Amino acid sequence: MSNSVLSAQLHHLEKGTSLTQDAFARLRKNKMAMTGFFILLFIIAISLLTPWIAPYSYEEQNLDLGASPPSAAHWLGTDILGRDQLTRIMYGSRISLMVGFIATAVALTIGVLWGAIAGFVGGHVDAVMMRIVDALYALPFTIFIILLTVIFGSSMLLLFLAIGAVEWLTMARIVRGQVLTIKRQEFVEAAVSMGLSPWRIISRHLIPNVIGTVIIYTTLTIPSVILLESFLSFLGLGIQPPASSWGSLISGGVETMEEYPWLLLFPGLVLTITLFSLNFLGDGLRDALDPRASKD
Amino acid sequence: MTSEKLLSVENLRVLFNTRNGQTVAVENLSFSLEAGKVLGIVGESGSGKSVACYALMGLIPSPPGKIESGRALFHGKDLLTASEAELRHLRGNKIAMIFQDPMTCLNPYMRIADQLIEVLSHHKKMSKKEARAKAIASLIEVGIKDAETRINEYPHQFSGGMRQRVMIAMALLAEPEILIADEPTTALDVTVQAQILALIKGLQKSHNLAVIFITHDLGVAAQMADDIIVMEKGKLVEQGTTETIFKLPTQEYTKALLRAVLTTAKPVASAAKLNEPSLLQVKNIQVGYAMPTGLLLNRKKQFARGVDNVSINIQRGEILGLVGESGSGKSTLGRSIIRLVDAQSGEVLFNGKNLLELSASNLKETRRSIQMIFQDPYASLNPRMTVFDTLAEPLLVHGIATKNTVLDCVNELMDDVGLDRRFIRKYPHEFSGGQRQRIAIARAIALKPQLIVADEPVSALDVTIRAQILALLLKLTQKHNLTMLFISHDMSVVRYLCDRVVVMQKGKLVEEGVTEQLFSAPQQEYTKQLLAAIPTL
């Protein structure tokens, strides 16, 4: 009998509500968080569909037109080279969001595993692992990333790795702290006394119980990663033209702020809306997952 | 009964708005309190006994709580409609309260002196010097030695019992007419509990206080109260004088509560054969807690003694009780046997093998034969795993069941511990405390262990549930021929369940003996104290 037969046998029984389902039921009632969630969904959908729905090509120049304010042909105006601003923001969202999600995923994977192992094993292993984190923390991260881009040249892959490598440190610390409190709980002791392997205890008993905190922190990491990419692109270290990201668009916009304010305004607006949505969603998740919030 | 009614509560109804709709916490409760009398309110958790009293003090958080109807007349004034300012004047001044956990009720950052003086200067407008003298006098009255110097200490420098004494002193400072005591001794050790109860009783007499004594423990209520009301699920079940409640209970629920008080000895002796070799022998074990000193990796370890040179024997098939108060090292000893904490020296021989010398891989096999049941059923189950996953995990990991047979095994376990098979897809938070403890017991017996270490498995449970769980443990030990090390602070539970008893105090073994002998003729002074402290009906 395979797993599926077993689950078929279990299927007719009344299903319990897991804590996660409970939390999402609560989240659905939070209007701000749900608004944030749908705006985010909309932005992600647009960015995925960009190659098919973008009104122009992102490198198509129209030097005769030059920088033009919003019009019927170009809803958000054009930049100095006559490229359509809406198209560039749409393409930019692909890169910004991709950096946001991939770099966060990198940070998440390393950070959660690192923190959980350090916290659970404890002792010298914990001491050494956390001193490594401390040492990396002490490195000035901008210089670290600049150094990497100087050595390896700027590529997308490097950008993901570099940002991920910086962001996992906080995640590791948070997860370790959580694991330290959870591993003192009796259900972990029960798992130890049942003779389960350390890996099984970490993966089945510890990590599922820190996932709430991790989700919350993730929604806060994504915006900070997007900002970090914007910042690096702003410095000219991230995305190279003609490709665009929100950061590089804003950086371009700043240079011509006085003559052509719409070049700064629109990418800035889109970035702000995205960050707000993520933060509202993060706040909502925190309230939904915090057991103390369930009282009211 | 001609004495004056100090407080009369009529038709009190308290609601709580929760996400799942309204719950009635207190339904149509009426009672009255006479001056100089002690009223015991008895009930299990969730019976609304505390909520009712908090409502009187205006301490129900609102929202979600709501006092829907009722009156509570105190000197002709309705407490339920009183303004916040009026209530502030009454609280602490006319009606004082003491709580279960004295640590959370004292401000840890303030000296005792300042906390006591604050009460006096607030309610009595005394000068600082007067207030200090009065505070010291009241500390002496509640039996705190060296009150002059100790008044300058912080709450954490006092033991649990001493803190409760400070709380009582603080409650009585403003010379209230009514004292509401909400489970004041539940968090304390039995011998300390006996002292505090005697203290409250003495002060009640000398100050002619009216006391509302909230407790889940019928023994304590019998000892303290003149009148008793029994509550269940927010409703008043029965009220009367203490004597009628205990001698002639009329309601089924009251009778069930009384039955749950364990006054009897163990119904059936276990099949322990004393001439057989021991299943478990603990020899001269020393367990300490490391207190790291020094920096980073070259830390030197110093040890605080948890268990000091203790030896015990458990025969196959017997239930050995391990009794002691908090800090006696009984839990540490239990945990060191299954190596949840490391012992510094000594031997733990299980079937002749020294567990303390086993390598990690051999340990896995042995752990299968020794299982543990924990105190807190809310903490001992993984909140993110269904009952099925919780019970199936050990079976699959140890290869006792395959994917084909695991469902049958889990169902059998559910039957064994008296839970409905239909519940196996539910999560722990959907069960009550007693049901969760059943799940924990099912997990412990899943591996068909030879020895179970049960660490206070019933002390977090309500009395009626406790009786059920104890009966279940007894049934299972007989059915599966289990040997059990039963750790408890509760002498009456031990008497009901155990064949032999070991008494520990401050990490050392004090006395051991066959249960009935130890209870009828204790040899050591400490054992006598423990036995004397059991509240009796």
Image (cartoon, rainbow, N blue to C red):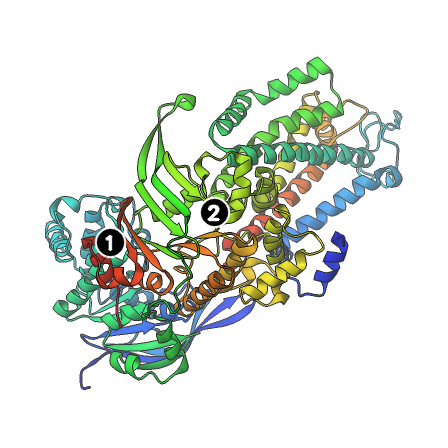
What is the spatial separation of the Cα atoms under label 1 and label 2, in whole angstroms?
26 Å
Q: Which residue is drawn at 28% across and 61% down?
A: B184
Q: Which amino acid does label 1 sit on?
A: Gly
Label 1 packing within 10 angstroms: few (<14), some (14-19), many (20+): many
Q: Residue at x 24, y 61 (%)?
A: B531
The residue nearer to you, when weighing A230 against A292, is A292
Taking B303 as reference, is B350 above or below it? below
Whether marks 1 and 2 lie on the same chain:
no
Secondary structure at badge 1 equals: helix
Which numbered marker is on residue B354?
none
Q: Mark 1 points at which residue?
A: B161
Which numbered marker is on residue A185?
2
Which chain does the residue under circle 2 lie in? A
Q: Is residue A190 visible?
A: yes
In the rendered image, residue B294, in percent from the top left (x then y), is placed at: 35, 24
Give the residue at the far top of this rendering: A151
Taking A243 as reference, is A289 above or below it? below
The residue nearer to you, when weighing B220 against B336, is B336
Which chain does the residue under circle 1 lie in? B
In the rendered image, residue A164, in percent from the top left (x then y), is placed at: 65, 29
The residue nearer to you, when weighing B35 against B444, is B444
Q: Can residue B12 be seen in this view?
A: no
> Which quadrant holds the N terminus of chain B?
bottom left
The residue nearer to you, when weighing A150 against B441, is B441
In this image, B362 relative to A63: left or right?
left
Secondary structure at badge 2 equals: loop
Give the residue at the far front of this rendering: B275
In the rendered image, residue B485, in percent from the top left (x then y), is placed at: 40, 53
Q: What residue type is labelled 2?
A: Gln
